[in-house]
Amino acid sequence: MIDLDKLSYKTYGNLVIIVLTILALLFNMFPFSLIGFIICEIQIPIYLIARSKFNEPIHAYGLNICFIVTILFYILLYLIILLTDFLLGRNFALILSITLNILGCYATSTLPNVKDEKGKLFFGFKRDESKYQKLMDYIKFNGLNEDLINAEKRLKEVDTQIYLVYKRKFREDKTFKEISEEFYLENPRIVEMLDKAYFYIIGALKI
């Protein structure tokens, strides 16, 4: 099985769009219905726009599970569109599908924030912590880099607590809540310490 967490968010987003388009075609292939395909296909941009508007758009529990949930959601939505189209007409199918799509976007954009604060960014939309993204990406792909390890050692010698907060966030991917509970720090203080660690490491690495 392909580990989707290793994909870039742009690649992941394109993959989802391709799969959903193929599903839309399959659901309207026998017999082929252009109108039905269009109704299914317009759900994709509606989904993207709606998710970007509701709270903080994230991928709950990583990209693998998010992909499965998204595909299952759209299979169900496409089935509802076909059944509603057959029983009640296309106008009703269009209205109902858009309504259900937006409700689904609301659920997937808000509930994961409560259940998994470590959820990943949605199709590249930025969150408040994105100012650290350069270093986070560097660590992700160069975690064993000697210059990085030496910079972390020097940071630890300069200020042990800042190093520990840095380690929890950048190395262990802890949430602000988890860091706050462990070190009894308020969020503004955590941000201040992360800023210092970020600029120290970035400066040492010259990236």
Image: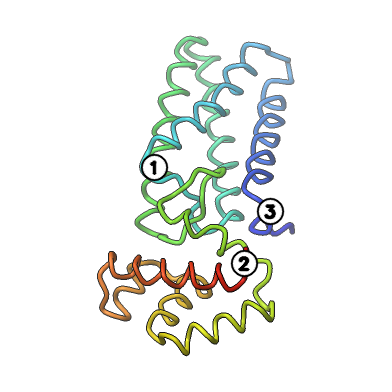
Q: Which residue is mark 2?
A: 206
Toward the viewer: 143 or 82? 143
Toward the viewer: 41 or 192? 192
* Residue type pointed to by label 2: Lys
Residue 86 to residue 60: above or below: above
Q: Nearer the viewer, mark 1 or mark 2?
A: 2
Toward the viewer: 187 or 33? 187
* Residue type pointed to by label 3: Leu
Provide residue 178's location: percent of width, then percent of height: 35, 72
Distance of label 3 from label 1 (alpha carbons): 24 Å
Q: Which residue is mark 3?
A: 7
Provide residue 28's location: percent of width, then percent of height: 68, 20
Dot 3: few (<14), some (14–19), or many (≥20) neighbours within 10 Å? Answer: few
Residue occupying the point 56% across, 43% down: 123
Q: Which residue is mark 1?
A: 107
Is residue 95 found left or right of 24 in the rendered image? left
Is residue 161 found left or right of 3 in the rendered image? left
Q: Quadrant of residue 50?
A: top left
Provide residue 85's location: percent of width, then percent of height: 53, 15
Judging from the image, what secondary structure is the residue with disc 1 in? Answer: helix
Sequence order check, earlier mark of 3 and 1: 3
